[in-house]
Structures are given as C-alpha cells and as structure tokens.
Image (tube, grey):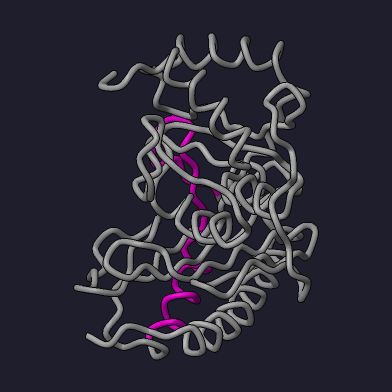
Amino acid sequence: MNTLNSAQLADLCATVQTISMRVGEFIRSQREVFKPGDVEEKSHNNLVSYVDKTAEQMFVDALAPLLPEAGFITEEDDQRATGTHYNWIIDPLDGTTNFVHGVPCYATSVALAENGVPVLGVIYEIGQDECFYGWRNGGCWCNGKRVHIAQTRELRRALLGTGFPYYDHGLLKPYLALFEDLLQNSTGLRRPGSAATDMAYVACGRFDAFYEYGLHSWDVAAGIILIEEAGGVVTDFEGKPNPLSGSRIVCGTPGVHAELLEKIKHYFPPGH
C-alpha cells in the first residue's frame, strides 16, 4: 500500500468538494418538492428518505473511481464492502430530521480514512452554501479561506455545541446533569441538529467546543480531520484520540476541551 501524500490528498479533496456541492444541489432541489409521505422511520426518531438514499448513491458512484482500492462505510447501506487500508466514510444527509421539517441546518459529510484514521474531510452545509474541507497537513478551509479554531481558553467564556440523543436514552440522566452544569458555567449551548455542522463550526471558530454521545463514524469522521487541521483537539469522553466510532466525542480549543473533558469525566466516569 502506498500512503497518499499531501499533494494527492489535496487533489482528492478538491474533487470531493465538487462532488459534495453537486450532491448538495440535488438535496436543495428536493427540499422544494419533498412531502411528509416520503419519510421512512428506520427506528424510533431515526428518519430516512429517498433523498438520503439517492444522495448516498451519488456519492458512491462519484467516489469509487477516484481510489479503486477504497471501500465504503455509509449510513444508509451497511452491505457495501469495506477496504483493507482506505475507506470513504459518508453521511449523505446529516440532519435528516431538520431537512424533513424544513429547518435549514443540514449537511453532507465525506471523509477518507487511512487505516482507520481520517486523512481528508469535506462537510458541505447546504443552507448556508458553506463548504468546509481539509486534509492531512493541508490545513482547514471554508469556501477558499483558511480557517482556525477560536482562541478561547476558558470554559466559562465558551460557546458550546451539542446534540440530544434521538434513540439512545440509556445515558440521559448524566447527560442532562452535565447539560445543567454547562448552562451555568459557559457562555451558552447550541443544538443545531447536525453533528457534522457542529464540528465544522468548531473548526472555523464559531463554537469553542462540541460534545455528544450516540453518534456514528459517518457523523464525525470528516469533522475529526477538520478540527485537528484547524488546531483543535478531538477525543472520546476518556480523553483517548481518534474517536472514530462517534459513540462519545468531545472536541474544541485545547483549553476549553481540557476543562470540558474534566466535567464530562465527572458525569460519565471511565468505564460507564
């Protein structure tokens, strides 16, 4: 296996941006004609539609020729073959519930992982027409401008992003206790409804940190590389790096991440 160099990743990233914006335009066009009857419920509060499925197939068809040895890890079709060294990790529509209800925050998210570590990421927030992208040793960018994490060092001065669990309520009590604590010890909390967008906002300095549990690799893979390339820190709730599973993730500026992680450990002790 030959490791992709920075120039190759940059070229791939440019192509993925174009693909993401093309898929985003399809999603935007469907919002005008979408009807409530087009929604399916995979499980309680876990929605999917023909828009998600079509967008995912568009991504797979466009990405497959770019790196033939790469496999796919996708939200809507778990039967696709995974690769030995490289995998495209795709969320074709992150924020489906927002999309279904006409709330404008939803995004596409694509990452390329090398041996389980994201090395390229593109998040396209459709409503704001903002494309966030980055690659290993290439920095983080938004619509052609280099972006960085915020300079905030203290939790009490931080604006935080989070998400509410849709269907995994087993940790709801400690989550709400942490939420109450943070409401009183930060500038505020926001919940846009798209984890990919939340992480992009950390990367560009709009949020000082983000945390959530119950996510999946396709929710967080692109955001991990964007935040790291923007100068931020990404770990799980125990402080371990590369939380690609998404099950428990916390990220932000180094100072805010450190304080937030200590609070999280209080409410979610290691091993629980």
- Of residues 152 and 88, the one nearer the viewer is 152
Using the image as rendered, state which of residue 201 and residue 15 is in the foreground: 201
Q: Which stretch appears magenta? A: 39-64
The residue positioned 60% from the left and 32% from the top of the image is: 162
With 200 as the anchor, is 11 left or right in this view?
Answer: left
State the quadrant of the C terminus.
top left
Instruction: Locate residue 178, reporting x and y percent.
Output: 54, 14
Q: Quadrant of residue 108?
A: bottom right
At x 69%, y 59%, the residue is 125
Residue 119 drawn at (x, y percent)? 44, 69
Camera sees residue 113: yes
Residue 101's quadrant in the figure? top right
Q: Is residue 66 above or below residue 26?
A: below
Relative vertical location of residue 155 with respect to residue 153 in this rendering, above or below: above
Q: Nearer the viewer, residue 171 or 135?
A: 135
Q: Do we see residue 37 in this rendering?
A: no
- The residue that appears at 35% across and 62% down in the rendered structure is 117
Q: Is residue 256 magenta?
A: no
Q: Position of residue 201 (x, y in %)?
A: 69, 49
**Quarter placement of the N terminus:** bottom left
> Relative to 61, is 99 above or below?
above
